Amino acid sequence: MTTAPDDFLALHVPGRPLLLPNPWDLGSARLLVGLGARALGTTSAGLAGAGGRPDGQVGRDEALAHAAAVAAAVPVPVSADLENGYADDPDGVAATVALAAQAGLAGCSVEDWDPVREQPYPLEHAVERVAAAAATARRTGVVLTARADAGFHGSTDLDDAVRRLVAFAEAGAPVVYAPGHQSASAVRTLAGAVAPTGARLNVIALPGTPAVAELAASGVARVSTGSGLYWAAMGGLVGAARELLEQGTYGFWQEAATGRAEGGRAFADS
């Protein structure tokens, strides 16, 4: 669906976070909406995994086509995971954001991670990229999420994450995000640093992430799942397949019955 950026951004309320699950195909998207999701975000890792590929193996055209199909299939706002914007230079990232708007997306995220050099872009260059993306997002009606991704790749430098999120917010990103810094104290630090800028903080639900109620108390405005729901579904598949192949029994149908019932309701309404 096409959603005004103000409408999507209004769902991001510090202290009352938007829960943003991440589907990987149209069926999971419709099922999540049927279960009450008010907005969705695509997942690059989930999309790649659904195609039998590792994360990072999906190109811009495929990612945008997938996100557009999801957006057209559900009556809620959809934000696209666009990795590093599929470009190193600010103009290239801005062009990707413009394409996201043309695809009917309510939002998109752009990382500051250079996948070739496997390191963050230098701060000045990262800010230039965000500024260009944010200007295009405002002009075309997309809510930009700017990500500082070093923590996702093992960095424990919280001060650097704070510097980057504040700089990204000041460069025009209305939502910011530093995945990998998940402890309660780290989240409080990030939220406290971001709050004066007016930007909203997203936190990803990973093992060790505080529960939603605690994140809300810290001022978090959005909680996403990344590839977590995809891998949870794959975990269910692994368990069911092992039961069949190793034990020759069908107990997996107990869990499958729940999925079939909820899916049947969701798909009938689509």
Image (cartoon, rainbow, N blue to C red):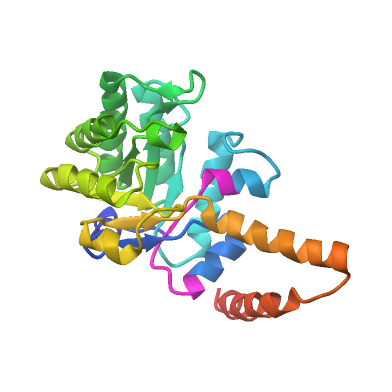
- Residue 40 figure quarter: bottom left
Q: Is residue 181 at all visible to an observer of this figure?
A: yes
Q: Residue shown at 24%/31% (left/top)?
A: 159
Apparent side of residue 240 relative to residue 65 in the rendered image (left or right): right
Q: Residue shown at 74%/77% (left/top)?
A: 253
Apparent side of residue 220 relative to residue 109 in the rendered image (left or right): left
Give whichever of 173, 216 is nearer the camera: 216
Check if residue 39 falls in the magenta segment.
Answer: yes
x then y, percent, for residue 104: 43, 51
Q: Residue shown at 48%/22% (left/top)?
A: 118
Quadrant (top left/top right/bottom left/bottom right) for the C terminus? bottom right
Apparent side of residue 160 relative to residue 78 in the rendered image (left or right): left
x then y, percent, for residue 26: 59, 60
Apparent side of residue 237 relative to residue 209 in the rendered image (left or right): right
Q: Is residue 11 at all visible to an observer of this figure?
A: no
Q: Is residue 98 above or below residue 25?
A: above
Q: Is residue 127 above or below residue 227?
A: above
- Residue 87 figure quarter: top left
Span of residues in magenta: 33-46
Q: Residue shown at 39%/29% (left/top)?
A: 93
Check if residue 164 falls in the magenta segment.
Answer: no
x then y, percent, for residue 238: 73, 59
- The residue sitting at the left extreme is 196
- Say how many tags the image has: 0
Give whichever of 101, 37 is nearer the camera: 37
- Residue 205 figure quarter: bottom left
Quadrant (top left/top right/bottom left/bottom right) for the N terminus? bottom left
x then y, percent, for residue 122: 32, 19
